[in-house]
Image (cartoon, helix red, strand yellow):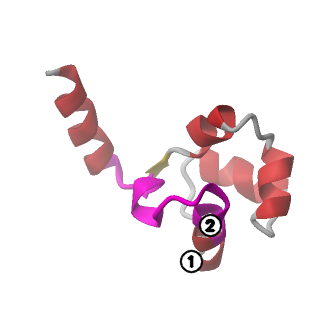
Amino acid sequence: MSNRIRELRAKYKMSQEQLAIKANTTRQTIIRIEKGERPSFNVAMNISNVFNIPVNEIFFTNCVKQELQNINSN
C-alpha cells in the first residue's frame, strides 16, 4: 500500500512524532505506515482528520499509484 504521509508531513512541516501525537498513535506506527504497512482503520481515520483530507486521497494501492504516475507523465 502506498500513501502520501511523508509528502503531507513535509508540506505541513510536521515530524513523525508530531503526527503520531496528533493522530493518537506512536512514531513507530507512522514509520511503518510510511514504509508501506497498511494502517488500522482508526489510525487511517485519525491521520485523515489531522490533515483534513479524505482517507482515499492519502492511502491507495500500488496499482492506483502506478496509474497516477502514468497520468502525470503524459
Furthest residue toward bottom: 42
Up-down: is 66 above or below 59?
Answer: above
Q: Which residue is mark 1?
A: 41
Q: Is residue 11 left or right of residue 19?
A: left
Q: Residue, x 57% and y 63% (percent of image)?
A: 48
Q: CA distance from mark 2 to mark 1?
A: 12 Å
Pointer 2 residue: 49
Figure check: 55 above or below 68: below
Q: Position of residue 18 (x, y in %)?
A: 84, 50
Residue at the image point whose x is 80% and y is 66% from the top: 25
Residue at point 19% right, 30% down? 70
Tag 2 near tag 1, CB within 8 Å: no
**Earlier along the polypeptide chain: callout 2 or callout 1?**
1
In terms of depth relative to the viewer, which is nearer, 11 or 36? 11
Residue 19 percent across, percent down from the top left: 77, 53
From the viewer's perspective, tell me whether residue 73 is left or right of residue 26. left
- Rendered image quadrant of residue 45: bottom right
Which of the two residues, 31 or 13, is positioned nearer the viewer here? 13
> Would residue 69 be found to the left or right of residue 51 on screen?
left
**Residue 62 drawn above or below residue 6:** below
Q: Nearer the viewer, mark 2 or mark 1?
A: 2
Picture layout, residue 60 above or below residue 9: below
Give the image location of residue 4, x and y in percent. Answer: 51, 44
The percent coordinates of residue 8 (x first, y second) are: 60, 41
- Label 2 sits on what residue type? Asn
Check residue 61 for magenta coloring.
yes
**Region in magenta:** 46-62
- Is the residue marked by circle 1 packed among few (<14), some (14-19), or many (20+) residues within 10 Å? few
